[in-house]
Image: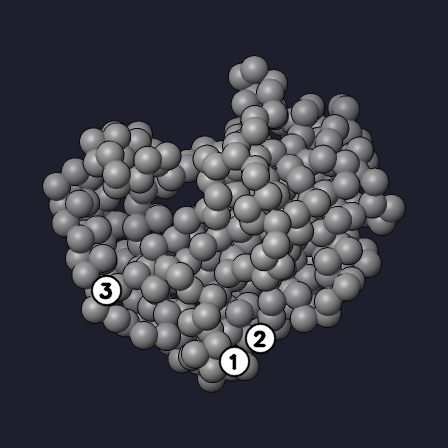
């Protein structure tokens, strides 16, 4: 299978040497690396100097995660896409182990690896998980499976999962094009960034594709925005942590979570509705600046509802089968 490794440059000069050295050291025999420029802080110059085999694609503007990757998906010939965040470091067999899973089961449309946290400040691989995939709850909650936990083999036995995290997802091209809106829009471009990985994962499930966990595909990720380690068990810590995120992360996550639910959730249960009301109440009290995204959210809801109809018309599994993936 021909593999295309994709990355978007976004103020990532300090990561280039470590990240690209790991990409180039992959033991998979047939892959090419493409780098799209979003916001350059000298990273492109470093890549051209030290990794000249990388193909640089500069659209002349920051297209965002969704639109930018859609352009790459539609223009690059490959069987498999591996999306590597600018702050992600792969073990040498990451691609080969993920491809093994795709080759073994033609119904698998996406693969999640075993991803640990990475400390770039100290150049250190950490022993706690960043993600082993995405868990989605019937209440609308979404979280990275296993985040902050140590690896005790607790996730190794589960072959199929609900979603693949956007930090280092591996996609079968035929699968993501199968769920693309009008055959071209893989990631929903109204999202720009954040929750795009969850939305795509759920759409793949509705079309009958499986999402697999490859326990031997190991990588490390620094992550700009993660969940609170203690969650709502320590409300004050949760509030401080969440408010520390940049406005665009908080606002787009708020908007895109709502759009993801509208597009993909089979039932708007009381539990789901109450959680959304509670989340809105939290924003009203603690993060009032996030409210600025509400007019845009309202504007995009009708489009999301149209996409929902499209998803439901094209689904290949029943509501009951889909709900088995939700916690």
Q: Quadrant of residue 55?
A: top right
Label 2: which residue?
208
Query: Which residue lies at the image location 37% right of the left edge and 59% below the top edge?
Result: 137
Picture coordinates of residue 37 (x, y %)?
60, 39
Which mark, residue 271?
3
Label 1: which residue?
317
- Describe the element under mark 3 as helix, strand or loop: helix
Using the image as rendered, state which of residue 20 and residue 242 is in the foreground: 242
Q: Is residue 273 left or right of residue 72?
A: left
Query: Which residue lies at the image location 26% right of the left edge and 30% below the top edge?
Result: 237
Q: Earlier in the sequence, mark 3 or mark 1?
A: 3
Q: Is there a contact, CB below 8 Å, between mark 3 and mark 2?
A: no
In three-dimensional space, the C-alpha distance between marks 3 and 2, rounded to whole angstroms, equals 26 Å
- Describe the element under mark 2 as helix, strand or loop: loop
In three-dimensional space, the C-alpha distance between marks 3 and 1, rounded to whole angstroms, equals 23 Å
Q: Earlier in the sequence, mark 2 or mark 1?
A: 2
Picture coordinates of residue 201 (x, y %)?
52, 61
Q: Is there a contact, CB below 8 Å, between mark 2 and mark 1?
A: yes
Q: State whether residue 192 appears in this view.
A: no
Q: Tell me the quadrant of the picture where the N terminus can be found.
A: bottom right
The residue most toward the top is 122
120 in relation to 283, above or below = above
Which mark, residue 167?
none
Q: Is residue 167 left or right of residue 219?
A: left
Query: Which residue lies at the image location 21% right of the left edge and 51% below the top edge?
Result: 279
Mark 1 closeness class: few <14, some 14–19, many ≥20 residues within 10 Å: some
- Describe the element under mark 1 as helix, strand or loop: loop
Q: Earlier in the sequence, mark 3 or mark 2?
A: 2
């Amino acid at each position: 299978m021909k593999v295309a490794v994709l990355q978007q440059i976004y103020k990532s000069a300090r990561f280039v040497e470590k990240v690209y050295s790991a990409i180039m050291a992959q033991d998979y025999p047939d892959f090419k690396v493409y780098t799209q420029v979003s916001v350059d802080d000298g990273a492109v110059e470093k890549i051209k100097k030290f990794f000249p085999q990388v193909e640089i694609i500069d659209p002349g503007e920051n297209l965002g995660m969704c639109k930018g990757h859609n352009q790459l998906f539609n223009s690059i010939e490959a069987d498999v896409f591996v999306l590597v965040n600018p702050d992600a470091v792969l073990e040498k067999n990451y691609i080969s182990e993920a491809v093994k899973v795709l080759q073994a089961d033609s119904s698998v449309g996406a693969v999640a690896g075993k991803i640990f946290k990475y400390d770039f400040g100290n150049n250190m691989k950490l022993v706690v998980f960043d993600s082993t995939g995405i868990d989605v709850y019937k209440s609308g909650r979404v979280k990275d499976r296993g985040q902050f936990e140590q690896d005790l083999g607790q996730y190794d036995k589960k072959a199929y999962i609900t979603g693949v995290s956007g930090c280092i997802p591996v996609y079968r091209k035929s699968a993501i094009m199968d769920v693309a809106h009008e055959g071209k829009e893989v990631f929903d471009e109204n999202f720009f960034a954040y929750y795009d990985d969850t939305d795509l994962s759920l759409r793949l499930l509705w079309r009958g594709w499986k999402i697999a966990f490859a326990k031997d595909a190991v990588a490390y990720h620094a992550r700009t925005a993660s969940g609170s380690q203690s969650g709502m068990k320590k409300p004050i810590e949760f509030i401080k942590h969440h408010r520390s995120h940049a406005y665009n992360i908080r606002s787009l996550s708020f908007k895109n979570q709502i759009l993801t639910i509208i597009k993909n959730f089979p039932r708007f249960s009381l539990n789901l509705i109450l959680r959304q009301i509670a989340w809105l109440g939290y924003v009203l009290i603690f993060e009032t600046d996030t409210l600025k995204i509400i007019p845009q959210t309202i504007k995009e809801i009708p489009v999301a509802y149209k996409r929902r109809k499209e998803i439901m018309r094209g689904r290949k599994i029943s509501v009951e089968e889909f709900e088995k993936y939700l916690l």
